[in-house]
Amino acid sequence: MDALNLFGNLASISGISLKNGMQLFGKKIKATAEPPNEQEELKPEIAFVVEVTRNVMPDVKKYIQKRSMNASIIHVTTPEDESQLDADMREDWHDFIREFSRIMEGVQQQISPRKTHIFISAPASLALGIGCTIGNVKRPHIYHYDNKTQSYKLVIIADNELR
Protein backbone atom coordinates (compact mmCIF):
# COMPACT_ATOMS: atom_id res chain seq x y z
CA MET A 1 0.00 0.00 0.00
CA ASP A 2 1.27 3.47 -0.76
CA ALA A 3 1.22 6.37 1.69
CA LEU A 4 -1.59 8.19 -0.12
CA ASN A 5 -3.97 5.24 0.17
CA LEU A 6 -2.97 4.60 3.78
CA PHE A 7 -3.66 8.21 4.81
CA GLY A 8 -6.97 8.23 2.93
CA ASN A 9 -8.02 5.06 4.74
CA LEU A 10 -6.82 6.41 8.09
CA ALA A 11 -8.85 9.58 7.61
CA SER A 12 -12.01 7.62 6.89
CA ILE A 13 -11.69 5.21 9.83
CA SER A 14 -10.33 7.66 12.42
CA GLY A 15 -12.51 10.69 11.75
CA ILE A 16 -9.35 12.82 11.47
CA SER A 17 -9.29 15.31 8.57
CA LEU A 18 -7.07 14.65 5.56
CA LYS A 19 -5.35 17.63 3.90
CA ASN A 20 -3.04 17.70 0.89
CA GLY A 21 -3.43 13.93 0.61
CA MET A 22 -0.55 13.27 3.00
CA GLN A 23 -1.40 15.06 6.25
CA LEU A 24 -3.92 14.14 8.91
CA PHE A 25 -5.18 17.00 11.08
CA GLY A 26 -7.13 16.46 14.27
CA LYS A 27 -8.00 18.85 17.07
CA LYS A 28 -4.54 18.59 18.61
CA ILE A 29 -2.52 16.40 16.29
CA LYS A 30 -0.87 16.57 12.89
CA ALA A 31 0.53 13.42 11.27
CA THR A 32 2.60 13.45 8.10
CA ALA A 33 4.21 10.66 6.09
CA GLU A 34 7.94 11.26 5.66
CA PRO A 35 9.07 11.62 2.98
CA PRO A 36 5.75 12.77 1.58
CA ASN A 37 5.86 10.73 -1.62
CA GLU A 38 2.32 9.73 -2.46
CA GLN A 39 3.15 6.89 -4.85
CA GLU A 40 5.93 5.26 -2.84
CA GLU A 41 5.05 1.90 -1.38
CA LEU A 42 5.24 1.83 2.39
CA LYS A 43 8.14 -0.11 3.81
CA PRO A 44 7.49 -3.25 5.91
CA GLU A 45 8.28 -1.38 9.14
CA ILE A 46 6.78 1.86 10.46
CA ALA A 47 8.56 4.39 12.68
CA PHE A 48 6.29 6.73 14.61
CA VAL A 49 8.12 9.91 15.56
CA VAL A 50 6.14 11.81 18.20
CA GLU A 51 7.58 15.29 18.45
CA VAL A 52 6.11 17.69 21.00
CA THR A 53 9.00 19.11 23.02
CA ARG A 54 11.92 19.31 20.56
CA ASN A 55 12.79 18.67 16.92
CA VAL A 56 14.03 15.06 16.80
CA MET A 57 13.47 14.22 13.13
CA PRO A 58 17.11 14.77 12.07
CA ASP A 59 18.33 12.47 14.87
CA VAL A 60 15.71 9.80 14.14
CA LYS A 61 16.40 9.86 10.40
CA LYS A 62 20.13 9.51 11.07
CA TYR A 63 19.49 6.60 13.45
CA ILE A 64 17.23 4.80 10.94
CA GLN A 65 19.68 5.34 8.08
CA LYS A 66 22.73 4.29 10.12
CA ARG A 67 21.05 1.01 11.05
CA SER A 68 19.62 0.43 7.57
CA MET A 69 16.15 0.06 9.06
CA ASN A 70 13.54 -0.64 6.39
CA ALA A 71 10.98 1.74 7.90
CA SER A 72 8.61 4.39 6.62
CA ILE A 73 8.22 7.33 9.00
CA ILE A 74 4.98 8.79 10.29
CA HIS A 75 5.79 12.12 11.92
CA VAL A 76 3.32 13.11 14.65
CA THR A 77 3.31 16.64 16.10
CA THR A 78 0.95 19.33 17.26
CA PRO A 79 -0.43 21.62 14.53
CA GLU A 80 1.69 24.71 13.74
CA ASP A 81 -0.61 26.98 15.73
CA GLU A 82 -0.16 24.75 18.81
CA SER A 83 3.59 24.54 19.41
CA GLN A 84 3.04 23.07 22.88
CA LEU A 85 0.12 21.44 24.61
CA ASP A 86 -1.23 23.64 27.42
CA ALA A 87 -0.73 21.93 30.79
CA ASP A 88 -3.87 23.64 32.08
CA MET A 89 -5.99 22.14 29.30
CA ARG A 90 -6.32 18.45 30.18
CA GLU A 91 -8.73 17.87 27.30
CA ASP A 92 -6.01 18.95 24.83
CA TRP A 93 -3.76 16.18 26.13
CA HIS A 94 -6.60 13.66 25.98
CA ASP A 95 -7.37 14.70 22.38
CA PHE A 96 -3.73 14.27 21.34
CA ILE A 97 -3.55 10.80 22.92
CA ARG A 98 -6.91 9.71 21.46
CA GLU A 99 -5.98 10.93 17.99
CA PHE A 100 -2.55 9.27 18.17
CA SER A 101 -4.24 6.04 19.25
CA ARG A 102 -6.63 6.17 16.26
CA ILE A 103 -3.75 6.67 13.85
CA MET A 104 -1.63 3.92 15.45
CA GLU A 105 -4.55 1.51 15.47
CA GLY A 106 -5.44 2.37 11.89
CA VAL A 107 -1.88 1.70 10.71
CA GLN A 108 -1.90 -1.67 12.48
CA GLN A 109 -5.23 -2.59 10.83
CA GLN A 110 -4.40 -1.28 7.37
CA ILE A 111 -0.86 -2.52 6.83
CA SER A 112 0.11 -4.66 9.85
CA PRO A 113 3.77 -3.60 9.84
CA ARG A 114 6.42 -6.23 10.55
CA LYS A 115 7.82 -3.91 13.26
CA THR A 116 6.60 -0.69 14.80
CA HIS A 117 9.29 1.68 16.09
CA ILE A 118 8.31 4.48 18.47
CA PHE A 119 10.46 7.57 19.09
CA ILE A 120 8.93 10.08 21.51
CA SER A 121 10.01 13.60 22.37
CA ALA A 122 7.25 14.69 24.73
CA PRO A 123 6.56 15.33 28.41
CA ALA A 124 6.68 12.10 30.44
CA SER A 125 2.97 12.26 31.24
CA LEU A 126 2.09 12.46 27.54
CA ALA A 127 4.49 9.60 26.72
CA LEU A 128 2.86 7.52 29.45
CA GLY A 129 -0.59 8.27 28.01
CA ILE A 130 0.61 7.24 24.55
CA GLY A 131 2.07 4.06 26.06
CA CYS A 132 -1.34 3.16 27.42
CA THR A 133 -2.75 3.12 23.89
CA ILE A 134 -0.34 0.74 22.17
CA GLY A 135 -1.73 -2.51 23.52
CA ASN A 136 -2.63 -3.88 20.06
CA VAL A 137 0.79 -3.21 18.56
CA LYS A 138 2.80 -6.38 18.06
CA ARG A 139 6.11 -6.06 19.92
CA PRO A 140 6.62 -2.30 19.63
CA HIS A 141 10.24 -1.17 19.69
CA ILE A 142 10.59 1.89 21.92
CA TYR A 143 13.62 4.17 21.81
CA HIS A 144 15.27 6.64 24.17
CA TYR A 145 17.60 9.47 23.21
CA ASP A 146 20.92 9.15 25.05
CA ASN A 147 22.48 12.56 25.62
CA LYS A 148 25.91 11.03 26.26
CA THR A 149 26.14 9.33 22.87
CA GLN A 150 23.93 11.88 21.07
CA SER A 151 21.95 9.00 19.58
CA TYR A 152 18.92 6.83 20.13
CA LYS A 153 19.01 3.49 21.88
CA LEU A 154 16.46 0.72 21.74
CA VAL A 155 15.34 0.38 25.36
CA ILE A 156 12.15 -1.67 25.25
CA ILE A 157 10.72 -4.35 23.02
CA ALA A 158 7.30 -4.65 24.60
CA ASP A 159 6.15 -8.24 24.48
CA ASN A 160 4.00 -10.48 26.63
CA GLU A 161 6.55 -10.33 29.48
CA LEU A 162 5.66 -6.67 30.02
CA ARG A 163 1.89 -7.00 29.57
Image: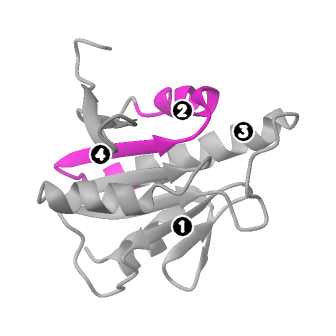
Nearer-N-terminus badge (1/3) = 1
The image quadrant where one finds the C terminus is: top left
Q: Secondary structure at mark 3?
A: helix
65 to the left or right of 125:
left
> Residue visible at 46% across and 55% down?
56
For the residues labelled 2 and 4, the Cα–Cα distance comes to 14 Å
In the depicted view, which residue is nearer to us: 127 or 43?
127
What is the count of numbered marks?
4
Tell me if residue 137 can be seen: no
Q: Percent x, y for residue 98?
A: 62, 42
Compared to residue 70, the image places residue 40 above or below, namely below
Which region shows up in magenta?
107-134
In the depicted view, which residue is nearer to us: 55 or 142?
55
Image quarter of residue 147: top left
Disc 2 target residue: 127
In the depicted view, which residue is nearer to us: 147 or 42?
147
Is mark 3 in CB contact (under 8 Å) with mark 2?
A: no
Disc 4 target residue: 117
The image quadrant where one finds the N terminus is: bottom left
Q: Percent x, y for residue 81?
A: 79, 66
24 to the left or right of 145:
right
In the depicted view, which residue is nearer to us: 47 or 10?
47
Q: Secondary structure at mark 4?
A: strand
Disc 3 target residue: 93
Nearer-N-terminus badge (4/1) = 1
Disc 1 target residue: 12
Residue type, label 3: Trp
Residue type, label 2: Ala
